[in-house]
Amino acid sequence: MSRPLSATEQVSTLRDQIRAHDHAYYVLDQPRISDAEYDHLFRQLQQLEAEHPDLVTPDSPTQRVGGAPLTQFPEVTHRVPMLSLANAFSENEVEGFDRRICELLGVDSVDYTAEPKLDGLAVSLSYEAGLLVQAATRGDGQSGEDVTSNVRTILSVPLRLNPAAPDLLQVRGEIVMPFAGFELLNQQQTAAGEKPFVNPRNAAAGSLRQLDPRVTATRPLAFLAYGIGDLSGALPETQFDLLQQLRLWGLPVSPLVARVTGIAACMDYYARLGQRRAGLPYAIDGVVYKVDRIAQQQKLGAVSRAPRWALAHKFPAEEAETVVNQIDVQVGRTGAVTPVARLRPVFVGGVTVTSATLHNQDEIRRKDLRVGDTVVVRRAGDVIPEVVRVVTARRPAEAVPFVMPENCPVCGAGLTQAEGEAVLRCPDGLACPAQLHRTLTHFASRKAMDIDGLGDKLIEQLVATGMVRTLADLYHLKPPQLASLDRMAEKSAENLFQALRASRQTTLPRFIFALGIRNVGEATALALARYFRTLDALMEADLDELERVADVGPVVAASLREFFQEPDNRRVIGELLAAGIRWPEMPVQPEEASPLAGKTIVLTGSFSLPRTELKARLQSAGARVSGSVSAQTDFLVVGEKPGSKLERAKTLDVVIVTEAQLVELIATPGGADQTSV
Ligand code: JCF
């Protein structure tokens, strides 16, 4: 007897089929049906779910993209820290590693797993009862960012594991962007007038840091698991078995993992993988060796932030030959003028390189580099490609030596050189369009004023049209003016206008950083803001006072002094303040006795202050503010309409306080006063 399947049954069958095909495709690398057949199943499920919205569950394959865009990523404390790897650059160092391990374990030879070291981003995925509940970046290893909504869009990340998976599983792995997808993405970026990404790793990082998961969903990311943080139930006996387990539970693991015995076999694996490297679908930068027996791993333990039982054996930086077509001169934000070699495009280190920095005139002279020369370029990891040497034997007769110009190639001002410095500078500051452009780019950037939508192409137009001549001009732009620019529709002009308005509410550390003072990075800006608490105090400080700030030495102090004494800079600051830029008062620095010093605090619900501000105040009282409740949490602060964190805090016996109680706590003698939580 058969009856028609109910919608519930159909949905469930379709989901099982789709998951099985996902598994075959992403984990086993053995697709069982064509793309068209897969799409058909997927559309059937989408349609059924549209007809029966009550049947939609978060782990349905159709629900990878969901949730509203975020304004920032919440912080996640890793229950088990995410370790990094010790590096080795030579066979000698690898032998040393093996010798130490054999000695510590009192054995003659050790079994290792060997695997490709993926050049991507480490993440930790938490599964509870088989469902993906959280994905976090590595961050500093102790805490990272909650990127769950974005990671859910990555098709090789299972939303649900095989029923055999343990109740609690924290998987560690790497998110990468395969070369093919990377090249395609960059073509799209260029076509849309956006800057291409320099390498797949940066592209993966940028994609994972999108606040809108719909954007991440369009990016070709992939995930491969290499270990665990935590799991309920028994650990397998070996690393190799653990990886097989992960695969059986439904997680993608590199097919290139091997178990090898002894150091000679490690070297052999390294040599063989090195030969296959160029043919792999994604970037790798070495081999990871791990002691295979988990019991031995536990005996060896970890030193500082890396396990003693694992090692990354790096490949040497890749080199390739190409030709210098031209040497351009670039003007940086602070006026530094740098020669750049324009190269015949060459594929090296996983990306196509078209230019290399030449640093300065002395460097070019030392290398005797001429336009038309064949050169060896090297690209290691994330660093800017450089010219290693000239192949003089292949120098064409017409190769011309390069001479630095005497004038700024952009504004024509005579270049200057400070005593003892190799760099030439354009002295014209913001009157030089190149410096203005770079200054605006920095000012608008995420860690500075964070002006959403003010990209490179727009800045170029704003400078070229003369609509913006100083930083403050940005704040006087009106929507109709913005709409007159290329690629700007009325709607995007209005959005940019609103983003500019919104950016006026900032913080003092951001504002100091945004000014783009030479040698003043994000951390220094924060230290200065904390110490001086007001912009006026900072602007008037003398060298001695400046050097009293932690991390500020004579060089930074001199840069600050020079910047704030320059009448043009003082005028621009005045104009910016007049345009409405403001920030909350900096809190008084807590004394040692602050009751919050060193405490881990989690917030839930809404408060009388914006959450970012409350967080900043707690941090300056010496507290750590974490995004999730764990056994390490000291207080949970509950506001209006608390979320699920409250329940979790109760089960973990975490101390729960209200906002009012928090204020009292801080106002105790020895603590900071009330207004400066
Ligand atoms: O592929 C990697 N980048 C990678 C990183 C592989 C591993 O097995 C790792 C790692 C970082 C830490 N294992 C640890 C413990």
Image: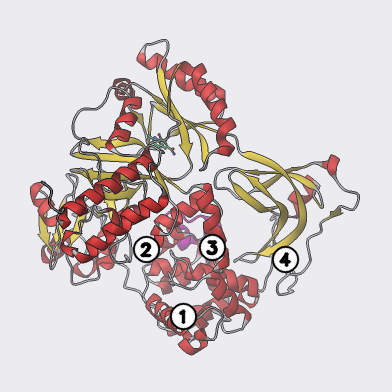
Three-letter amino acid code of the residue under disc 3: Gln
- Local packing at callout 1 (Cα closer than 10 Å; few below 14, some 14-19, many 20+) is some
Three-letter amino acid code of the residue under disc 1: Leu
Secondary structure, magenta segment, majority class: helix
Indicate which disc residue 188 carries: 3
| Above or below for 320 versus 437 | above
Return the residue nearer the eye: 543 or 204: 204
Question: Which x, y percent locates residue 538?
Answer: 44, 69
- Local packing at callout 2 (Cα closer than 10 Å; few below 14, some 14-19, many 20+) is some
Three-letter amino acid code of the residue under disc 4: Thr
> Which type of secondary structure does the marked residue at label 4 adopt?
strand
Which residue shows up at 84% across the image and 42% down it? 394
- Which of pointers 4 and 3 lies earlier in the amino acid sequence? 3
> Which type of secondary structure does the marked residue at label 3 adopt?
helix
> Which type of secondary structure does the marked residue at label 2 adopt?
helix
Classify the position of the C terminus by image quarter: bottom left
Indicate which disc residue 576 carries: 1
Question: Which x, y percent locates residue 630?
Answer: 18, 47
Q: CA distance from mark 3 to mark 1?
A: 36 Å
Q: CA distance from mark 4 to mark 3?
A: 40 Å
Which residue shows up at 45% across the image and 60% down it? 522
Q: Which is more foreground, mark 1 or mark 2?
A: 2
Please say if the residues under marks 3 and 1 sit with CB atoms less than 8 Å apart.
no
Q: CA distance from mark 1 to mark 2?
A: 35 Å
Which residues fall within the magenta stretch? 544-560
Tell whether 564 sits left or right of 376: left
